[in-house]
Image (tube, rainbow, N blue to C red):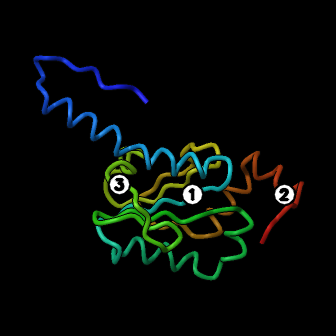
Amino acid sequence: MKTPVLFFAAGLTASLAATSAASAGVPTRSFLAEHQWQSRLLVINAESFDNQLIGRQKALLAEQAAALCDRQLRLLVISDQAVRFEGAAVNLSPLALRQHFQLRGPSVVLVGKDGGVKLRTAAAVPAEELFRLIDSMSMRQAEMRFDGSNC
C-alpha cells in the first residue's frame, strides 16, 4: 500500500482524508485477494437490493446451484447501502468495490479466478451464457480435466 505523500500546502485535513480513504480499501483488497485463484465472482451492481437487474440475474441462476458450485462461481451484490456476498451482508465498501471494478450504473461483471474482468454488461446474463464463457477459459478447461469438483 502506498503511503500518502503529505504536502504542507494541502493541509492536515487533506492528508487525513487520504489516509482514511486508503485504509478503507484494505478490507476490499483483502476480500478480493482471498478469492483470487479460489473462486470466480459474479458482481452485480445496482442502486438497491430490490433493483430489477439483481432480481433478474438471481432468477436466471436460481436453479443452477450445482453448476455454480462446479464452476466455483460466487455472487457479490453491491448496492448503495451495503454489499452482500452469497446472500450474506459483508463489511465492504460499495464505493471501493465500484472503484475497483470501474462500475458505473447497473451492471453485471464476471471476474475470473485471476482477478480479471471477463465480461461486463448492463443486462442480466443467462446462466448458459455464463457457463459457456467460463468453460472456454483455460483455467476452467484444466479444472474439467482434473474433475476435482467438491460439489
Q: Amino acid at mark 2?
A: Met
Q: Secondary structure at mark 2?
A: helix
Q: Of tags 1 and 2, which is closer to the observer? A: 1
Along the line of sight, the residue nearer the viewer: 48 or 23:
23
Q: Of tags 3 and 2, which is closer to the observer? A: 3
Position of 92 relative to 1 (above/below) = below
Q: Secondary structure at mark 3?
A: loop
- The image quarter containing residue 13 is top left
Q: Amino acid at mark 3?
A: Ser
Residues at badges 1 and 2 in contact (C-beta under 8 Å)?
A: no
Figure quadrant of the C terminus: bottom right
Q: How far from the left and from the top, in percent, is residue 89?
A: 43, 70
- How many numbered badges does the structure rendering display? 3
- Residue that numbered label 1 is attached to: 41
Residues packed near mark 2 inside 10 Å, few (<14), some (14 to 19) or many (20 plus): some
Q: Earlier in the sequence, mark 1 or mark 3?
A: 1
Position of 96 relative to 81 (above/below) = above
- Residue that numbered label 2 is attached to: 144
Figure quadrant of the N terminus: top left
Q: How far from the left and from the top, in percent, is residue 84?
A: 44, 67
Along the line of sight, the residue nearer the viewer: 45 or 126:
45
Q: How far from the left and from the top, in percent, is residue 9?
A: 10, 17
Q: CA distance from mark 1 to mark 2?
A: 18 Å
Q: Secondary structure at mark 1?
A: strand
Tag of residue 93: 3
Residues packed near mark 1 inside 10 Å, few (<14), some (14 to 19) or many (20 plus): many
Quick check: 58 left or right of 106?
right
Residue placed at 33% from the left, 37% from the top? 22
Residue placed at 53% from the left, 66% from the top? 75
Q: CA distance from mark 3 to mark 2?
A: 34 Å
